[in-house]
Image (tube, rainbow, N blue to C red):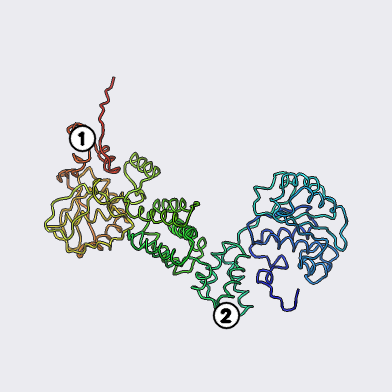
Amino acid sequence: MAEGHYQVLARTWRPQAFDEVVGQQHITRTLQNAIENQRIGHAYLFIGSRGIGKTTTARILAKALNCLSSPGPTANPCGTCENCVSIAAGRNIDVLEIDGASNNSVDDVRQIRDNVRLVPSSSRYKIYVIDEVHQLSGSAFNALLKTLEEPPAHAVFILATTEAHKVPATIISRCQRYDFRRVGQDDICTLLRRILDQEQVTCSDEVLLAIARAADGGIRDAESILEQLISYCGQEITFKDVFEVLGLVDWAQLNALCDAMLDKDIATQLRIVEDIVATGKDLSQFVQDIIRYFRNLLVCKTAHTRIQELLALPGHELAAMQQRADRFALTRLIQLIEQFAELSKGFDSQLAQRIALETLLIRVSKVAVEVSIDTVLEKLVQLGAGGVGPVAAASPPAAEPARAGKSEGPPSPPKRAPAPHQAPAQSPEHESASAPFRATVTESNMREAWLRVTEEAGAENLNLGIWLGQAAPAGIENETILLEFTRDQQNARSYLERPENRAAVERILRTLTANLTGYRTLVNGNVPEAPRPARETQPRAAAAHVNPELARQALEDPHIAKVVDVFKGEIVDIKRHVKE
């Protein structure tokens, strides 16, 4: 090496002992115990993705077997003897590192087979490290089989591969298999901080976390990224520098895109895509970032007790993601991930992918209801159990209440379930504050106010909206609205008396009205049956060719009426069952 020749960080900080290997303690400990107990194998298979320590561990194992500071193999090689130094430098004649990609023929393997019989010149073991072994040809693997199964006592084979499925089972069965893991973000950040302290470069923890995320579990990738950033920034690395150098999308833009999707703001979504394209970022990578972002939202939505462990995000960023996740329905997040995953497939051009991305963003903003087969089955099961639970559809429409009297001067017009020709109803991602009621409710307009409360509750929880729809506003006492139920509506009344449901409804009352903070339920056997919504009796209850009278009689069955209401369907045929 020439005097003053610069060595990159990945080589400078390459581990020289088992204890220095980051994130692979399950492997290094096993190898150390095997050496201490003199249980040294003749063939090892190291499996794992690139840059996580396979070849490095192979070199350390070679030093441990051949270290001259000990009378035999040692779990802690000295690193200073002639063998340790020459192995670390890659010039020891008894430790042969072979590239399986360029030495993959039968002749290459036959040469190894002929040379393996020769005893080592200055070491205890003759060690063959074959990197990317999966690239050997089928004939080469066959030529290696016998030697790999019964090598000389002085020979040790270490095979390394990133694609274990391409290695024949006959080879794997002759080796001790070690699976290397992707390194965790915390371990990567700790290593990078140690390197930066030695290099006298300053940066924040957010910078290290961004580098670790970009490296995706690869130590060598993380060190290469850090090398590039130091060359670009000098002695101080900022969070903005990471995104500029790596061409990543700033999380602020992903947050803005998510908010625009929640608010159905198509113009903002298209502007963000335009900004990504204008700054020269790869749209394929952008789609991957979107998938990763919504995956994080899904984790926030489902893994309540282990969010910090699974995401490893800064506290403020985690809190912001949690708030956004709460505004999505679970099935909506799953659908979005599946839809964006489709966009990650190959496109002929950047333009084609841009059009596909913009089309998807427009579609998910415009289409009010996207019900999957899982959602339909879930509704059917819950109907059979006596009620519809809070099904997390993509954008469930607000439930229609069973009673809705005339309004005298409503503070704001109610939103009805959309007919086919009407604009789609707002989805549950919209917050209540987007259309505040905030008017004083009196007995003259309480029915209209209660309709608005029912719709808002149904947007958050379909089951809650349905049961609220059975209540009839009967009056107002101070800050409490009185709700009447008939004697055959005890299930609805019991449901609304549950603490969690009461808390949800009272929160909506405080949000939408200026003077109501709670409700009280009453039982009145004289309360008349409320008329069914108009669409259940004629407009959408039956097709044009169905007898209206028969359709009306069918809808008198509460089970049929509920199915028609839940699935926004219509009766297309009526058949009478005749008992024989």
Callout 2: 10 Å neighbours few (<14), some, many (20+)?
some
Residue 235 tag number: 2
Residue 304 tag number: none
Q: Which residue matches tag 1?
A: 544
Q: Which residue is found at the position 78% from the left and 67% from the top?
A: 77
Image location of residue 220, percent across then percent down: 63, 65
Above or below residue 133? Residue 260 is: below
Image location of residue 337, percent across then percent down: 44, 53
Element under disc 2: loop
**Quadrant the N terminus occupies:** bottom right
Element under disc 1: loop
Q: Which residue is found at the position 31% from the left and 60% from the top?
A: 431
- Position of 103 with respect to 399 (left or right) is right
Q: Quadrant of residue 15?
A: bottom right
Image location of residue 95, percent across then percent down: 80, 61
- Position of 52 with respect to 33 (left or right) is left
**Quadrant the C terminus occupies:** top left
Image location of residue 155, percent across then percent down: 82, 54
In the image, 498 versus 424, the foreground residue is: 424
In the image, 39 versus 489, the foreground residue is: 39
Q: Which residue is found at the position 85% from the left and 60% from the top?
A: 124
Above or below residue 460? Residue 528 is: above
Q: Earlier in the sequence, mark 2 or mark 1?
A: 2
CA distance for labels 2 and 1: 77 Å
Kind of residue at badge 2? Gln
Above or below residue 221? Residue 384 is: above
